[in-house]
Amino acid sequence: MIARERPLAVAMLSGGLDSTLALRLVADQGIEVRAVNFSTGFCHTDHARQVQRRGTDPQKLRNQALHVAAQLRIPVDILDISAEYLQVLKYPRYGYGQHANPCVDCRIFMMTRAREYMERVGASFLFTGEVLGQRPKSQHRHALALVARESGIGDRLVRPLSARLLPPTLPEREGWLDRSRLMDFHGRDRKPQMELARRLGVTEWAQPAGGCCTLTDPNYARRLFDLFENGRRDALDHEDVLLCKVGRHFRVAPTAKIVVGRFEEENAFLRNFCGGRPTLEAVDVDGPIAVLDGEPSDEMLQLAAGITARYGDGKTHERVRVRVDHQGWSRIVEVEPLSSMQCDAWLLR
Amino acid sequence: MRADEGWTVELDARGLLCPQPIVDLASCLRSLPVGAVVLLRSDDAAIAFDLPAYCQSTGHELLALAHEGRLWSGRVRKLHDRI
């Protein structure tokens, strides 16, 4: 390891207010910092970029961790952990939070990866923007200790925003960090963070804490658990995850689901990321793109065409022609649009 | 090691979902010698913000950034081996 004049620390940086403040508290003590940002595939901002609605301010779609790191001149690495993260999501040892969020397992997994990164770059410790008591599932005292232990990081993990309420860590005991200059924040009240931001001159930040994860969205959770209940837990893949984010979802059979785009950008997304599944679109009238997720039998294609027709401009027509595209072939199916009542019976709400 | 002038690697990130273009760029830069240039192509509109931020954060040099319609092209010169 290279001998350093000052310790090197790794920041887990989301780019939200808490991790930004934690970074400032550590960097302002003369510690050399580099940041790591994890891409799990479940970030709202990432999804907003994938389904870019017309008129969306592109500034709101920027990667906030990159933006914060650039402002503070802190080098940042974005690590794509989305493939491994699926395993965490399928079988969380410590269960889910209110929706599909496996927060404790998520923290252990990320912290383990961050520890490995810390060791790889020769850093002395790791820190996060976690606040004691801020989140019921993963940030109470016991959970914070559990995450530090299970990830193998132990007392090389500092939570600068709550450090004075927690046992002294190695960097504090060694004198690399002055504990008295760290914080004693606790709970969900954000006023202390706002006040600290004002004091440090931090003037802009991303969403409120916890607001970026798709897995805390009840609609997303319902779609994901529907896949699990219908035999897709083991086989869950990246495309399943993407499909759950868009459109209306109709569970028409245990082995078949139909996803219908709700607006132009979702239609474009479904067309691009259908992952080899059959797509459907009305031929003579405007309407959505639909994707059939499941065995493309004649019966299912007829059903999917009827639902596709229901959500297009031909919904009051007696018959609508719908084109099915699948792996290089196309065919036209002529159907009667299904009624709202029929569709509602299958709609995942 | 320093690459010869004119050594440019093209990285086509069109159609890739965020943040993959930046992840791939970082990986590409790591594999190249100091001085090499990466030409990144992306159709992700936010690359207009993310690419300058990445360069400012990591200390690599953003030589150019331009777009034609939805297609963005950015040229980045690797300045060091630190990240």
Image: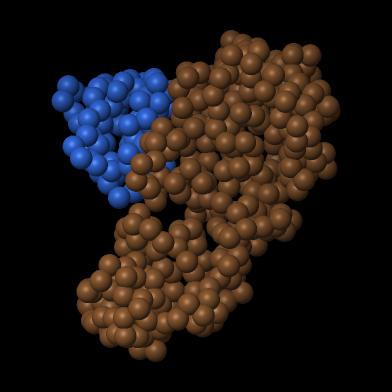
In the image, taking residue A36 as reference, residue B2 lies left or right, namely: left
Residue A12 position within the rendered picture, expressed as x and y whole percent measured from the top left: 59, 33
Which chain, by letter, is brown?
A: A
Q: Is residue A139 above or below residue A22?
A: below
Name the image quarter holding the C terminus of chain A. Answer: bottom right
**Quarter occupied by residue A316:** bottom left
- Which residue is drawn at the image coordinates 16% and 25% (left, top)? B6
- Locate residue B70, reporting x and y percent: 24, 42
Q: Residue furthest bottom?
A: A299
Image height check: is A31 above or below A114? above
Q: Is residue A343 left or right of residue A141?
A: left
Is residue A83 visible to us here?
Answer: yes
* Residue A83, above or below A157: below
| Chain assigned blue | B
Q: Position of residue A129 (x, y in %)?
A: 66, 31
Q: Position of residue A210 (x, y in %)?
A: 64, 42
